[in-house]
Amino acid sequence: MNLRLLAWLVLPVAGIIVAAWLVFKILSAVLGAIVWLAWVALIVGGIVFIGYKAKEKIGGGNSKKRIDYQ
């Protein structure tokens, strides 16, 4: 078998494998970053929510009690 023919058959397959590996690595990194940011947002949001609830419980909340004058 001619080496040039072998190269024409093997190199495209190797290129497809390398390209697929590279796309997988990039998508894995991007999706991993998105999931990490979602977890951080949930944790920070939970801490802020708990902080506001605790502030309301001790009377320092922003909810103003109305006095109805009739």
Image: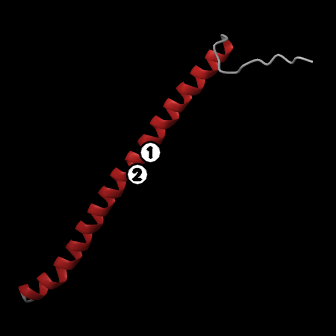
Say left or right for 52 vs 23. right
Q: Residue furthest front?
A: 70
Q: Quadrant of residue 63?
A: top right
Task: Please determine whether, in this image, residue 3 is positioned above or below residue 22.
Answer: below
In this view, the residue in front, 39 or 28, is 39
The answer to whether residue 17 is above or below residue 37 is below
Q: What secondary structure is found at the residue carrying circle 2?
A: helix
Residue drawn at (65%, 10%), measured in percent from left and top?
58
Q: Is residue 41 left or right of residue 3?
A: right
Tag 2 residue = 31
Asked which secondary structure carries label 1, the reply is helix
Left or right: 68 as drawn, with respect to 64: right
Q: How many marks?
A: 2
* Contact? badges 1 and 2 (CB < 8 Å): yes
Which amino acid is tagged 1?
Answer: Val
Q: Residue at x 57, y 20 (%)?
A: 51
Circle 2 crowding by C-alpha within 10 Å: few under 14, some 14–19, many from 20: few
Q: Which mark is residue 21?
A: none
Q: Quadrant of the C terminus?
A: top right
Amino acid at pointer 2: Leu
Which of the numbered marks, if any, corresponds to residue 35?
1
Inter-mark Cα distance, 1 to 2: 6 Å
Q: Position of residue 18 (x, y in %)?
A: 23, 66
Q: Nearer the viewer, residue 62 or 53?
A: 62
Q: Residues within 10 Å of mark 1 (few under 14, many from 20)?
A: few
**Residue at x-position 88% and y-position 17%:** 69
Identify whether 21 is placed above or below 45: below
The image shows residue 37, relative to residue 64, as above or below, that is: below
Q: Is residue 64 left or right of residue 15?
A: right
> Percent x, y for residue 6?
13, 84
